[in-house]
Image (tube, helix red, strand yellow):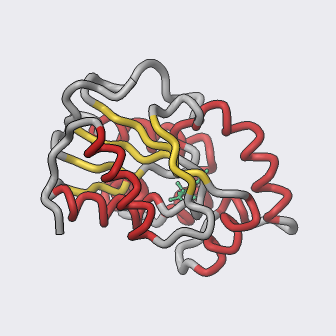
Amino acid sequence: MIPPTISRIVLVGFMGAGKTSVGRRLAERLGWRFFDLDAEVERKTGLSIEEIFDRWGEDRFRVLEVEVGNLLLVETEAVVATGGGWAASPERRGELPAGTLSIWLRVHPEEAVRRAQDDARARPMLDVEDPIERARELLIERTPLYEAATLRVDTEGRAVDDVTSRILEILETHGMEFDPE
Ligand code: S3P
């Protein structure tokens, strides 16, 4: 259910779904602040995501990701782009705080890998011989958890502005006001 008053929007979904780009754009359009969970984890640790995986491993990264995510989930008038594993993390339990609208940005594995490869940021989870196969496996595991989001928006073949406009359209239909461009 869409919360009656939306204090924050959390974007979930696989790597390459466009969470960071759409989140930044959405925040701009709403006049809200934007937070990127990976960037916050990097800022707090002084290490890149790749370095965290290399030095401490995935399990430690998941703990950090949830800890830092919890700090962001108290922000209001904020759009939070999570990392692709956050919604599915075993470290993350329970409901999102009241006033949180979660949106799943959906992408297919082939497109996700293509976009991730075009992006300068390293994706340790896809650093394997067959990243598409890995993406398929991860998506099978994670899809039920992404599906728990309140809204789903398909991003396949759609530009950042299109996806953002689609989200704003849905919000408008539910009576939410924002500054039109
Ligand atoms: C991960 C996704 C990445 C980053 C880390 C792990 C994942 O974020 O958190 O590399 O497990 O799906 P993006 O979804 O922003 O690429």
On-image quarter of the N terminus: top left
On the rendered image, what quadrant is the C terminus found in? bottom left
Between 36 and 122, the one nearer to me in the picture: 36
* 76 in relation to 48, above or below: above
Residue nearest the viewer, comparing 43 with 78: 78
Q: Quadrant of residue 25?
A: bottom left
Query: Residue at left 67%, top 38%?
Result: 143
Query: How many numbered circles does the render carry?
Result: 0
Q: Residue furthest front?
A: 173
Name the residue located 57 percent from the left edge and 54 percent from the top edge. 154
Q: Nearer the viewer, residue 76 or 90?
A: 76
The picture places residue 179, in percent across and down from the top left corner, at 13, 59
Task: Ligand 1: give its quadrant.
Answer: bottom right
Residue 32: x and y, percent? 17, 54
- The percent coordinates of residue 90 (x first, y second) are 59, 29
State the residue in front, 5 or 47.
5
Task: Report the side of 11 relative to 130 (left or right).
Answer: left
Task: Please indicate whether residue 162 sits to the left or right of residue 78 in the image.
Answer: right
Residue for point 62% across, 71% down: 116
Examine the rendered structure and indicate whether residue 48 appears above or below residue 78.
below
Report the residue that reaches farthest toward the top: 94
Which percent across, then down, holds residue 135? 75, 55
Q: In this view, does 161 lie above or below 97?
A: below
Using residue 81 as the reference point, say whether residue 60 is left or right of it.
right
The residue depicted at 49 percent of the width and 45 percent of the height is: 12
